[in-house]
Image (spheres, helix red, strand yellow):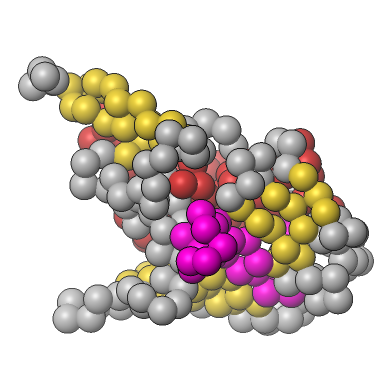
Amino acid sequence: MPSPETVEVDFIAPRHLAGGGDPAWITAPLHRACGWSHGNAPLMPRVILSSPDQKALLRLEPDPDGQWWTLQHAPEPDRPAWYASFGARTPVEIIAGFIDALTDPTAAPADPQDAVQPLMNAGWSPSYRHHRFASPDNTVRVDIHETTGTWWIGTLLDHARPPVWQARFGEHTPPHLIAAFTTALADPRPVLRTGTSLSLPTRSPHLVTQTRQEVRAVQVASALEDRIRTLAARHTAATAAPSVPRRPPTSPSHTR
């Protein structure tokens, strides 16, 4: 039995089979650390956050037949409008890779190949003329449309059943954001789940490693606040630093 100073938590690997986790891992830092505003609709089961420049809109809406997380970005002088979406059981730690890169004031443009490199470094297998990648456990498929450059990532336990979760990136999604997502997706480190957020798509020991440990209660309780402070400090440092011209983006090319 845990002591009053400790709680039992589960560390789940691989992270893509850890379940969705706590949505506040995304929404609270966006609002409190990055200055995203939200509407006030207490009777609606959804959250809508808009970026300070009003160019990005993140919608979290429970939809049993669709993507729960949808981000839409307005066009800019050098890029048409784009979107990204994530299913309900997409682990928030993986979504955070994408969102944290989006809100990083020092993020630099990237080449489309950079989005594939984290998967290759982690031993994911390319096939179909390098437009599809499979995770080592063969439960995740990454498909890149050869012509448009759109991405579809799906976690499947059984091809006869719907995907556990999907992520989709429109053709004009900045490559450095997709690279941040694939980096988080391929990260071998387990993610933490507590009793209230422990909803695994499978408990098969052949696919999931579930390790229960006692952890200091204050450590679990402060994890979100620590994350918010870290992201807020990032913005403060960027504001205080002298302005440095950003490298212009490379000409768009499709992943090969």
Between residues 120 and 222, which one lies in front from this camera angle? 120
Residue under the point 23% across and 35% down? 221
Image coordinates for residue 186, horizontal then vertical, percent: 63, 41
Quarter of the figure with the C terminus: bottom right
Q: Is residue 36 visible?
A: no
Q: Left of 211 or right of it: where is 239?
A: right
Quarter of the figure with the N terminus: top left
Q: Left of 210 or right of it: where is 137?
A: right
Q: Left of 99 or right of it: where is 25?
A: left
Quadrant hosting residue 77: bottom right
Image coordinates for residue 243, horizontal then vertical, percent: 70, 51
Residue under the point 71% across and 36% down? 122
Q: Is residue 16 visible?
A: yes
Residue 100, above or below 76: above
Between residues 23 and 106, which one lies in front from this camera angle? 23
Q: Residue furthest left?
A: 4
Residue 172, magenta (yes or no): yes
| Region of the chain picked out in magenta, as a range | 152-178
Residue under the point 62% across and 81% down? 74
Quadrant hosting residue 39: bottom left
